[in-house]
Image: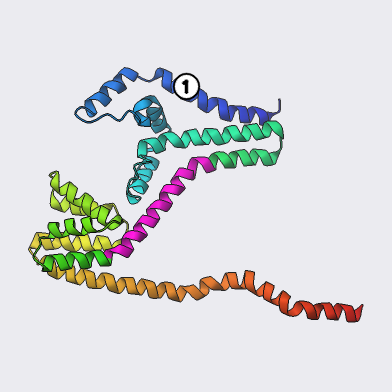
Amino acid sequence: MAPIEWLFIALIVLPMSYLVWGVVTSDRKGILAVRVNLTQGFAQDGGSIGQRSPAFLVLSKRLTPKGYEAKLDRWLSLAGRPTSMPLDRLIIAKPLLAVGGAAIGLFLYANSPSAQVIALGIFLAALLYFLPDLLIYNAGVKRQQEIELELPNTLDQLLISVEAGLGFEAAMARAGGNGGGAMAQELTRTLQDIQVGRPRQEAYEALAQRSSVQDLRSFVRAVVQADKYGIGIAKVLRTQAKQARVKRRQRAEEKAMKLPVKVLFPLLLCIFPVLFIVLLGPAAIKIVEAFS
């Protein structure tokens, strides 16, 4: 066989062999004992991938760099940690998708061997490996935009509740219960952290760390300083709500100013050529007929 064929076979055989070797040589009893000790007292979910095949999870974590795993965990935090794609399931799915892409490339190369098929197989393997990352990153960006859009209204609700006589945590509970977006979910999670015994300042700082919105981080810093130095929370909320509304209006004005520039390229590439054809086409036909 040609060297390219051996290369494709190696792309399939070597990862699968390493996967099987990791499953066979893993200490299943030790992993099971650790899992039982860690999950003692909690309900066991038999449908979890990590619980059905812990050896695959251990092997996938060995293949995943620690820095890259931390980056995936950060993206999941920004995306709200969707229940359909936890970190363990994501780490397991990425190598399997890459092997599937390499298998598709090998199948295509077996039917029509060429350099283009080789490039297509490598592209499919890389695309399927990084596809979950793109989906999670996109979900995180959309969720942070939603938080940025909902923050001024949420601050207004907190201010109204505090001025009506409620405490700050009761106002957070009211805003989180009445809302249904990402900001309400973050407030509810912060309250849950406080209720389970986490210090209030750490819960607020965790709220800021779970988001990349600078306005939310500024609000959390103001609340922490107000709680530390005894400043009235109503005054802080009034100032933060006013700043959030001003910044939201400024962002809307900025987007409106950028709109003509964004419309210019579709206008030049799609509308003007068709318009020129409609207007100058008959004249060009008449000129060609006159000279011919």
Q: How many marks?
A: 1
Which colour style is shown?
Answer: rainbow
Of 106 and 287, nearer the camera is: 287
- Give the residue displayed 16% in from the left and 68% down from the top: 160
Q: Position of residue 145 (x, y in %)?
A: 36, 60
Q: Is 142 a magenta residue?
A: yes
Q: Is residue 143 left or right of residue 129?
A: left
Q: Position of residue 7 (x, y in %)?
A: 62, 30
Residue 56 vertical position relative to residue 248 in the rendered view, above or below: above
Residue that label 1 marks? 20
Q: Quadrant of the C terminus?
A: bottom right
Q: Is residue 226 left or right of residue 273?
A: left
Residue 39 vertical position relative to residue 256 in the rendered view, above or below: above
* Main secondary structure of the magenta stretch: helix
Of 45 and 196, nearer the camera is: 45
Residue 120 vertical position relative to residue 246 in the rendered view, above or below: above
Q: Position of residue 136 (x, y in %)?
A: 41, 48
Where residue 34 sits, quadrant-wise, is top left
Q: Which residues are magenta?
A: 127-151
